[in-house]
Structure formats: C-alpha cells, structure tokens
Image (tube, grey):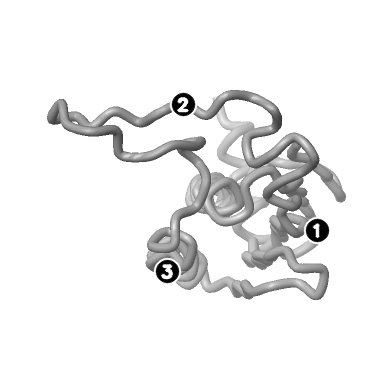
Amino acid sequence: EVTKLVTGRVRELPQGVELSAYRIVQEALSNTLRHAPGADAVVELSYVLGGFGLRVFNWAPPEPWGDEGPWGGQEPWEVPDPWGGEALGEGPALAPTPASATGSGHGLTGMRERVAMLEGELTAGPTESGGFEVSVWIPVPAAEREAEEETEREP
C-alpha cells in the first residue's frame, strides 16, 4: 500500500521540477517493489516557500513466510524456459533474487543527477526501522514562480 501526504499550498511547479519529481517517485517505488516486496510506502510532497520537498520511504518488508508458507497458501507457478527446456524456477516475479537484491545503484545515480541539474539536494539510505528513505529538496525561486504565474495570465 502506498500513502500520499501533501503539505503546503499545492501549486504548479516548473516543468523540469515536476518531471524530475515524477521520475524520482517512480524509481523509489520501483525500488520498494524490487527490494522490499510487500512493504508499505509513503510519498510526501511538501510545497513550501522557496522550494519543493519530496520524501519517499518504505517500512521494512514483511516476513517472507507466514503460517501459510512462502506463497501465502497459494500454489507457486512455474516460470517456463522461453526456449522450451525445463522450468527456470518458481515464485512471484517481483521477489528479489540474490543478484537483484543488491541492485546496480543506477536508479539512485539517476535520481542524484536529476536533482543536481536542478541545484537541489538528495539523501538516500536505510532507516532505523529496516526500511529505506529517499529525501529530495529542490529550490523553486520566488522570481521563477512569479514569472510563470505572469505567463499564465497573458492572453
């Protein structure tokens, strides 16, 4: 489950800020699915004077197996070999494998690059509760906001 929290007066942001925020949320939630399947996540959007804050975090993933076994009491499906050989394995497609559990880090690198282009700041790392958090601050100068509002008012 993903919860969205919004603080401040919601306003239109410059196109580069909106697109970067969208992509960062998309990547952070993809990382949650990949590295913490089943974990709840929170997306916080903060519209404040002078900038835009974004925070995406997830709780620790639930235990992989409950009383009903690793697939929640359902039969696991087999993943067929695309070349017609033996089945490659069992289990949900989103479950991390040892190779994918650590990730390549390109997602965080891309987030950092987007934020740096906008002269913002990004922090990312594990939380004390066993989850992961990505926090972003992107400055949106008042002059830029006023110019955009003025452009919108012109016929």
Q: Name which quarter of the figure residue 61 lies in.
A: bottom right
Identified at 75% across, 35% down, the residue is 68
Q: Residues within 10 Å of mark 3 (few under 14, many from 20)?
A: few
Position of residue 18 measured from the top left corner of the image (x, y, whole percent): 56, 46
Q: Nearer the viewer, residue 145 or 40?
A: 40
Q: CA distance from mark 3 to mark 2?
A: 30 Å
Identified at 56% across, 56% down, the residue is 35
Judged left or right of residue 3, residue 15 is: left
Q: Nearer the viewer, mark 3 or mark 2?
A: 2
Position of residue 46 measured from the top left corner of the image (x, y, whole percent): 78, 54
Q: Residues within 10 Å of mark 2 (few under 14, many from 20)?
A: few
Identified at 75% across, 68% down, the residue is 130
Judged left or right of residue 19, residue 32 is: right
Residue 38 sits above or below residue 100 on the image: above
Q: Earlier in the sequence, mark 1 or mark 2?
A: 1
Q: CA distance from mark 3 to mark 1?
A: 30 Å
Residue 88 sits above or below residue 84 on the image: below
Label 3 sits on a secondary structure element that is loop
Q: Earlier in the sequence, mark 3 or mark 1?
A: 1
Identified at 48% across, 70% down, the residue is 112
Q: Nearer the viewer, residue 13 or 141?
A: 13
Q: Amino acid at mark 1?
A: Val
Label 2 sits on a secondary structure element that is loop
The residue under label 2 is 77
What mark, if any, has residue 145 been given in the picture?
none
Q: Quadrant of the N terminus?
A: top right
The residue under label 1 is 48
What mark, if any, has residue 105 been given in the picture?
3
